Each structure stands twice: as structure tokens, then as C-alpha cells.
Amino acid sequence: MGSYKCCLCFTRKFRWCEAEPPADVRAAFAAHAGEGGSYMAADQFRKFLADQGDAGDDAESVIEKGLQLGPRQHLRGKLAVPAFTLDDFHRYLFSVELNPPIRSQVHHDMTAPLSHYYIYTGHNSYLTGNQLSSDCSDVPIIKALKNGVRVIELDMWPNATKDNVDILHGRTLTSPVELIKCLRSIKEHAFSASPYPVIITLEDHLTPDLQAKVAEMVVETFGDLLYYPDSESSKEFPSPESLKKRIIISTKPPKEYLAAKNDKEKNGNSQNLNGDEEAWGKEVPDLQTELDKTQNNDDDVDDIDEDYHDDSDDGKSMSQRPSPKYKSIITIRAGKPKGDISEALIDDPDKVRRLSLSEQQLEKLAATHAADLIRFSHRNLLRIYPKGTRFNSSNYNPFVGWIHGAQMVAFNMQGYGRSLWLMHGFYKSNGGCGYVKKPDFLLTVGPNNEVFDPKASLPIKKTLKVKVYMGDGWRIDFKKTHFDSYSPPDFYARVGIAGVPADTVMKKTKIIEDNWTPVWNEEFIFHLTMPELALLRIEVHEYDMSEKDDFGGQTCLPVSELRPGIRAVPLFDRKGIQFNSVKLLMRFEFV
């Protein structure tokens, strides 16, 4: 029984009770339980797991743990065998540990070149907050690595006395952190979440002597963990499998130092993004809207990111050139084309490289050079970074990059909001290892050298049915008056798809009033033209008729990873941290 004060002198009481197992749970239990349907023994439970598609190598472990939920002895003939009741079965289905919605194992082919994978990429990984005045630290780097991020960006500048290297966001009020501290933290935590390679992208603002010092730091700190190629150029990137437990460096080949080097070009109009001020984050811009904005824009896109430089000698004397050792530790190289953007996207058969574009440059190129982008990304790496006016460390729609083959869609990991939720959800794929194999249609060329067209209308490939049964855990993780001072919360769920424009949609359940354990029992159907890139979006909010609705949890799940059947779905807070207890009971079915 819960009591809420009303109008100072009155008390309203509400009874709290456990929700009954949904009808589908009762039906599944009845279909597999024997002897009148009162108990389910291990062999019957094994049959249920097989019918739900869970008869894998870990099925026996799941059976053992599941039976521990109801350690009852049921007489079968003269033998007492372990079994559990309908309530035990319901508890198993509602267990996030035993019955998660997606697979936790790496299952993609990891032997292809790096260019065949989407790679979990951070932007300005050292910043603790906004882009202008927050502290620089190794703490956000450690957090990112523990969350599975595989690409860490460091901006290198001379320190105040010009004898050492600091990491900071140049020409801002951000306070620096020493490079060596970041390198040591990367070494310690690089493989805490994934054994696959960590890529460090260095933005270099150093003199030749400091470049040589960086090379010494990197080699001494990482030792045998550091991978670098035997030759300066390669016709193909190595595979994630071959680079397990290795750290690699990506930057432009060093050139003579320019004391008054300009900041990298940042384009676009400033936007006042209030995502962090909303109850649960700003809605992600529609992909079609983003592309349409640039469809009729005829402006030339010829300003490439500053880390894209040619590595020619330019006839300089040896005394002006940086240490060869610094140049030799670079595995993923960037260069600068001598012409316009169309030349930058030409695939050189003799070497592979990386090209960086701002989100605005990508949008313009997507309207005019979509095929060139995709063709370039077959063998080379394409990195997208946030525009410079995102001072509050907000993010953008990642699908624009993903659908055009960009492997490194760089995000500000220290922020939060719906765009970052999509990024978190996308990289739950493939066991959360930070590398996701790109769909075949983004890697192949047709008989007439044609590539995938992101604007083409596609037929429906899959239909996904999603049923939201119920939710629980808020009464454990939140204070009684967190959502409403005068009564239990009024929860509703939003369920939808994030992906290509034809697939993107959001739907909503009814509102369940005054209940900490809402039961919706509502089904939604989603027709998908590109399920390979689709994410299932789930949000729970508490309805408030007088103010903005309160946030109650969220998650994004890769559609390609969903396990069919009845599953327990954990929810996360706005920063992407999993709640201790909040979860939904749902069913997924592919038609």
C-alpha cells in the first residue's frame, strides 16, 4: 500500500500489487508443462527454449540458472526432479540476465579489411563537457573504452613551455591534460570491453621535435601492443581479427610545422540545440530531411578536414622535416588532394587512406556525390565529425553517414540525447565489440560498376511484430514521489524504428494511470525495407497533464540482432547507463 499526501490535509492510498503473467506467457507455459500444467521440468523447459530459438551452446547453462529461480522438487513417478511453476517461468522470462533481447556474442566475420566495418568512434574524446570551456581529462577516454568505443581522438598541442605535449581543444578555454597520461590510460583500459583494435586518431599541431617526442612516448608506452606497417603505403587495411589486442595510430603524415596554423574549417549555421533541456532529449532529425536540405545546394564542397594532407616532401631540407620515426608509426594515413572533392573521392588502387568530412560536408556530398562516397568507402575509411557550432557537445543523425558507407561516424560521447542513444544501440550489435560488419550492399559493385543508391525505393524485406506486455522496476529505482507527488505514475511507451526514411516511424501505447507496474499488452507492426541498418527505439514516459512528460527510460536495439520470442528488455537513463531494475517484457516476431 502506498500513501500520497493531497492538499496538505488528505492522504490518498494506492494498493501495489504484482502484475499477473500475460496471457501469452500463460499459454507458453501451458503448452510445455506436463501433468495438468502445474509444473515445468528441465526437459520441458529445454523444449520451450528450442521452440523459441534458444537451443544454442549455452542452453544448458540457461536451464540450470532458470531452474534456480524455483528450486522446487516435483515428483515424477518415484523420482523428485527440479521444476518450477508459472510464476517461476514468468520470473525467468522477465530476467534481463537470463533472457536478454539480443545476442551477446561476436558473430560477424572479423577477417575482412577494416574498411568493411562500422567502427565505434569518439570525437574529442578527452573533453568532459562542452567544446569551449570544459576540462580535458583521461576520465572520458577511460569511460569510452569501457563502453566499447574503438576510436579515440586526441588533439595534440605544445604545452606552455613548448617542451612537452598537451591534449586540449585548441584556441578555446578548455584546460589541458598531458598526452602521456592519456596514453597510459588508453593502454590500461583499451581492451576492457573488447579485444579488437583501438585506433587513436591524432590531430597534430606540433613542431618536428615534439612529433619525435610523441613517437617515443607512443612506442615506449604501448610497446608490443602498438601495430605499425612495414611500408608507408598499403593496398588493403588489415582485419580486426589480425589486429586483436593491438593499438594503431591514424593521422596525417607529418609536414613542416606552421606556427600560425589555422583551425580546421567548420561550416554551417549555428543552431540552438536544447536537447539536454528536454525531458528526454531532442528528437533525431529525419534522414530524408537532412538530405533534402542539400539536394538543391550547388555550392562546391572543396574544404576538406585539415587532417587530410598530402605527404609529399615539397623539396624541404632534412633539417626542417620531422623525425622519420613519427611517420613510421602511422598505420591509417590521411592525405590532401591537390584538386577538388571529386578527386579526393577517387580510389587509388595502390594505397588506402582516410578522409574526414564534417556532417555538413557529408550532407552536401550525399546530394551530389553519393555513389562516389560509397565507392570510396569500399576500400578506404571515411570519417564524419560534428560541425564546429555544436558547442554543447550535441550530436547529429548518424544514419546519413552509415547509409553512405562511412565507417567512422564520430560522436561526442560525453553528451546525451536521442542521437547518442542511437549510437549506443547500433554498437550493441556483434556482441558489443565495437566493430559491426557493413551490409553486403554497401560493399559490392554491380556488373556495370554501379553501387548502392541510398535514394532508391526499396521493397519490404522484413516485417517485425513487437508486442509490449508490461514494465516493472521503477518503484525500486525511483523515489515514490519522483514522477508525481500525489499519485503513482501514469506510464506510456513509445515504440518505433530508426533507419532509412521509408522505415522510420514512432508509435505509442495507451497511458496506464496510477500504476508502478503498467500492463499495456499492445502490438505494433513495422515493415522494413532495410532491416540491416534499422534500430528498434523504445522509450517510456510518465504523462503529466500540466507540465512536460517525465522521462522513464529508453533503449535502442539493432533489429538484426533481436532474438525472436518473449524477452526481458532493460531500460537505460538519458546518459545511457542501465537502470538497476527498470525493464519491459516484450515479444519480437519476424514475419
Image (tube, rainbow, N blue to C red):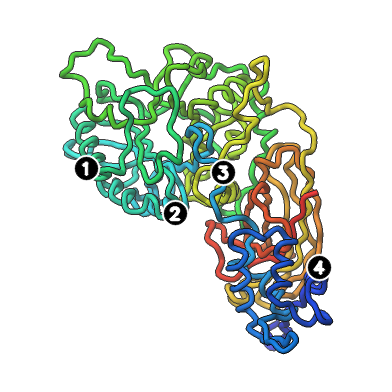
The disc at residue 193 is 2
Label 3, residues with CA under 10 Å away: few <14, some 14-19, many ≥20: some
Q: Amino acid at mark 1?
A: Glu
- Residue under circle 1? 220
Sooner in the amino-acid sequence: mark 1 or mark 3: 3
Q: CA distance from mark 3 to mark 2?
A: 17 Å
Q: Is residue 210 above or below residue 436?
A: above
Q: Amino acid at mark 4?
A: Asp
For the N terminus, the image quarter is bottom right
Sooner in the amino-acid sequence: mark 3 or mark 4: 4
Q: Amino acid at mark 2?
A: Ala
Q: CA distance from mark 4 to mark 2?
A: 36 Å
Sooner in the amino-acid sequence: mark 4 or mark 2: 4
- For the residues labelled 3 and 2, say whether their Cβ atoms are less than 8 Å apart: no
Query: Which one is closest to the eye, mark 3 or mark 4?
Result: 3
Toward the viewer: 496 or 190? 190
